[in-house]
Structure formats: structure tokens, C-alpha cells
Image (cartoon, rainbow, N blue to C red):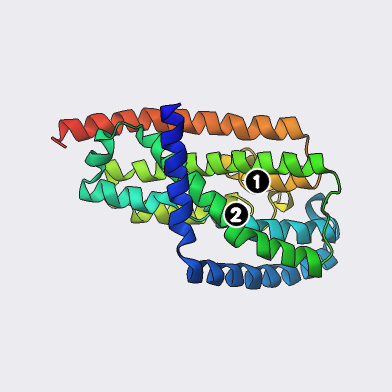
Amino acid sequence: MGTARLYAAVAAGGFRRYATYRVATAAGVFTNTVFGLILVYTYLALWDERPHLGGYDQAQAVTYVWLGQALFATLAIQGGGFETDLIERIRTGEVAVDLYRPADLQAWWLATDLGRALFQLLGRGVIPFVFGALFFPTALPDEAGVWLAFLVAVALAMVVSYAIRFLVALSGFWLLDGTGALQMLMIMGLFCSGMALPLNAFPQPLGDIVMLLPWSALLQTPADVLMGRVGVWSAFAFQAGWAVVLLAVGRWVQGAATRRVVVQGG
């Protein structure tokens, strides 16, 4: 119980940290709404030329756009979460203090990032999504159970996103400068998560390959759960599988990094 309270307090601290940046949050809401409008009209033009591209009709394509804008900051699809702080702490050596805490490094940053993600969902994601649903035709379900399944998929997506970025951050133990790793994270997040275009609209066999990667668990899977295009339990299994694998790899890399710090006299 004490451990649970500790990580709950860490998550609450992550939520409060981002809640203090009210001007930045308002700017983010505006930015996501504007980008949503640009993408919606781009998608509408594309779907006029290619009806049912990727199996979506226009309403589903529009829904996908606004989900992307709602989840972009929530899932830190192109970075912008805890990973920048952790890489900097590795570079300066302050991570040694983190390793001496009576808390697990991976669990500590997971709690921090979940708090951040929850704030970004509520503070920055809801308004653009509601705006899109009010002013554009969307394919949103009426059943409460589907919405509940969607929220579970988003929660699993948060964990997968964290696990990916934790591995990127740990690369700083060997690279020392994480700039290149962060840039690769941005590129892979934009392309492989489906932020630019739904993954099921990719040409084959590229589409099938990208759909198997962990990034597809971030946006594509929750979107398809919400629009009823995928079995709920198979979607959960896919996301949970990647979460377990990536967290396990992160645990192994963390152990190797910790031994590296000790060997170097940290």
C-alpha cells in the first residue's frame, strides 16, 4: 500500500506540473484545433478522390483526424514527455540520485508520465475533439461500452508510448547525447503511429508491416476500437503484449545501464 501511495503521489505530481502551464495548454489546444482543420480538409479532398480509402468512409476519416489531435500530446507521439528530462539527467549524471531513491527508476518515470498524459488528455485533447465532433460529420458510437473500451485502449496506449520513450531515454547511457535518438523518435512517431495517414491506408505490404509495430498501438488501435473496426479483446491483447515486451526490454536495459554507472564510478 505504501508503494502504491508513493507512485500515486508521483503521478499526481506529474499532473500538477503540467497543469501549471496554462498559457502553454491554451496554445496547444489552439494549435491542435488548427492542425485538425488543415488535416480534415486534406482528408476530405483525398477521400473525395479515393472513397473508402483504407476501409474508412469520410466520417470515419474525419473522426480519425480529431482523435489524432486529441491523443497527439497525450501519448507524446513525437516526444515531449519525460524522456527529455531523463536524457538530460543521464547526461549530467544526476540520474545517479534517481538510482539511489527507494523507488524503481522505470516505475517512477512511468507514474510521472501517466500523470502528464492524463492532464494532456483532459486539458489539451478534449476540446479539439469536441470541436471536431460538433462541426464535422463523425462516426462516433452511441454505446457506453464502446466508449469504455476506447478509454481502456487509450490507457494501454499510454503505457506502450511510455515504454518506447523509456528505451529511447536509456540510450543516453551509451550515446551520451540523446539528440539523434529524440529526432528518430519524432520521425517514427509521426510515420508509424498513423498521425500523418491511417496505417490501413498505407500501400501493401508496408501497411501490414507497420500495423505490427508497437506504434500502431498508440493511435490506430484506439481509433479502430472506437469506430468498431477491430475486435476489442484482440486490440487489448495486441497493446498489452507490446506493453509487456517493451517494459521487459526496458527493465533489462535499465539493469545494464545501472551496471554501467557503477563500473564508471557513478
Q: Dot 2, how many residues are within 10 Å of its Cα: few (below 14), some (14-19), or many (20+)? A: some
| Mark 1 closeness class: few <14, some 14–19, many ≥20 residues within 10 Å | few
Of the residues under marks 1 and 2, which one precedes in the sequence?
Answer: 2
Residue under numbered circle 2 = 121
Q: Residue at x 28, y 46 (%)?
A: 175
* Secondary structure beneath label 2: helix
Residue 144 visible, this orientation: yes
Q: Amino acid at mark 1?
A: Leu
Residue at the (30%, 29%) spot, across then down: 256
Whether residue 97 sits left or right of residue 185 in the image: it is: left
Q: Is residue 115 or residue 242 the one in the foreground?
A: 115
Amino acid at dot 2: Leu
Helix, strand, or loop for circle 1?
Answer: helix
Give left or right: position of 209 versus 178: right
Contact, mark 1 vs mark 2 (Cβ under 8 Å): no
Residue 151: % across, % down: 68, 43
The extreme left residue here reads: 265
Circle 1 or circle 2, nearest the eye: 2
Residue at mark 1: 206
Tell me where residue 236 appears, x and y as whole percent: 68, 33
Q: How many marks?
A: 2
Give the CA distance from mark 1 to mark 2.
Answer: 30 Å
Return the residue nearer the eye: 106 or 144.
144
Residue found at x 83% / y 55%? 139
Q: Is residue 202 above or below residue 39?
A: above
The residue closer to the viewer here, 47 or 250, is: 250
